Image (tube, grey):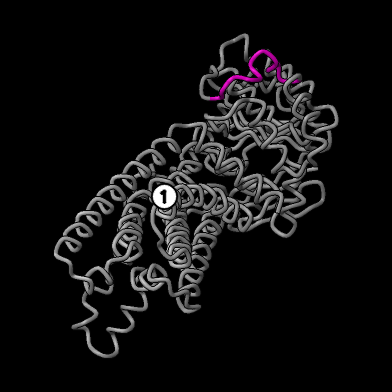
Amino acid sequence: MRNILAIAGKDLRSYFTSPIAYVILTGYLLLAGWFFFNLLANFNQMLIAYMSASAPELLENLNLNEWVVAPLLHNLAVVLVILVPMITMRSFAEEKKSGTYELLMTSPISVAEIVLGKFAGSFVFLFLMVALTGLYPLILLWFGDPEVGVIASGLIGLFLLGSSFVAIGLFTSSLTDNQIIAAVSCLVVLLLLYIIAWPAQSAGDSLGPLLRYLSLTEHYNELVRGVIDTRDVVYFLSVIALALFLTLRSVESMRWR
Amino acid sequence: MIEVENLTKRYGDLVAVQDISFSANKGQILGFLGPNGAGKTTTMRIITGFLPATSGTVRVAGFDIFEQAREVRRRIGYLPENPPLYNDMSVRSFLAFVGRIKGLSRMAIPDATDRAIERCGLREVSNRVLGHLSKGFRQRVGLAQALIHDPSVLVLDEPTIGLDPRQIIEIRSLIRDLSGERTVILSTHILPEVAQLCDKVVIINRGRIVAEDTIGNLTGEYSLEQVFLKCTSRDDAEREIDPAMGDTP
């Protein structure tokens, strides 16, 4: 445990002693703010239009959760698809490039401790990012009355989604000593998992549900809608576990090649 | 302290190290000599547990490096060819981190860090960022990280490479000070360094040991240069007439 914390602390500190953390956080919050502003402005316009048209049945359907929070969370998921590879690309690739990998691998710590430590470091950083975007829905609470449960469920979803991304990013980083390759291959895998369900409708009875099951978006959707289903949570946890397991094997194989 | 027996390492078809055996006793400084690409770094990486051997055994302080890797790693300090430094950390925080992953208790770390800083002459730079240090200081920090957990075996891969003459002298005297209780294996291709520092010499060429003896015995008749040239060229001649051994030119 102490070794895991040592590695996690080291990685986390290195995010913040270099400009990486600040660039990523600034970019992320800037984009999130822009999305939020636009969604809210849009919502406001619709509200005014419906009110002047005096259409109560339309107004009934208009709520902050569905029109602001849910689209915001979906947009943020796409932003994470792009940013998480930048967070995780260094984790193993840079250690290998700079030779510090030799230090880690010849220290009395296990490969599992290294992998979990690296995961924990990026995980905490991601948690910080997601928590900061939680501020935007909080603003809504101040001025309106969205459903808090649904917002919480959505944030949990974003958090689980991001953690799966981080685990996948660690895996691609463990395969190479080149950060660009690590980032690009992670991005491709994430995008693929994101859109894998697109042909589901025409894919037939057996393949269709499988593609839907594999798709990150389908599971994320449920959580954003406010439905915390164990199936979805288990899905994300198994993606994390599988990616970390593959990372472990890939790091170990380096030792036994 | 260190026993290497019939160690072989292959990368696919390429034989990096073939059937080498040697040993070093407690308190000895063993010089590991050989031309570039002879297999020095590979051997050291195997001893430190970074690479697995294809066959053969290595025991450090009585522990097998495969079976009891953790025990061995606790007892080895390793300075790879490029000092493994995190460029965005300060000297002090880097050494504290290394102390932690080498298994020092939280209480012991500040003392160990101070000791290593003092020993390697790093006091004036202890709060500087590693990425801004000169080559000489980087090498010394590399040595400090190898020492931090007070290991009984030190494995140093070309510890004086790229340093200016003064720094070379400083590092050498540091290594001499460090030996004492410890066993040191150091690789180099600077021959006078071996003559000055080492008790025992192992010359390796193309993955095979071509000489293993004490400095006194090796240099009785010839100078170390002559011995080295003889050992490393004789093997070349053998290779040319032995087509079965043919590998990369």
Residue stretch rendered in magenta on the structure: B119-130
Q: Is residue B41 above or below residue A62?
A: above
Q: Position of residue B232 (x, y in %)?
A: 54, 33
Quarter of the image where one finds residue A146: bottom left
Specify the farthest residue to the left: A53
* Residue B249 shown left or right of residue B206 in the figure: left
Secondary element type, mark 1: helix
- Quadrant in the picture for the N terminus of chain A: bottom right
| Circle 1 crowding by C-alpha within 10 Å: few under 14, some 14–19, many from 20 | few
The kind of residue tagged 1 is Ile
Q: Position of residue A155 (x, y in %)?
A: 45, 60
Q: Position of residue A16 (x, y in %)?
A: 51, 35
* Residue B207 shown left or right of residue A209 in the figure: right
Q: Is residue B69 above or below residue B179?
A: below
Q: How many marks?
A: 1
Q: Position of residue B190 (x, y in %)?
A: 59, 21
Residue A86 forms part of the magenta stretch: no
* B107, B61: nearer the viewer: B107
Specify the farthest residue to the top: B166
Quarter of the image where one finds residue B139: top right
Q: Who's the residue at 58% across and 57% down the image?
A: B54
Q: Who's the residue at 36% across and 78% down the image?
A: A213
* A244, B56: nearer the viewer: A244
* B61, A235: nearer the viewer: A235
* A199, B173: nearer the viewer: A199
Quarter of the image where one finds residue A93: top left
Residue B125 forms part of the magenta stretch: yes
Chain letter of the residue beneath label 1 in the structure image = A
* Residue B199 shown left or right of residue B127 in the figure: right
Q: Who's the residue at 39% across and 52% down the image?
A: A143
Q: Which residue in the protein does label 1 denote? A: A139
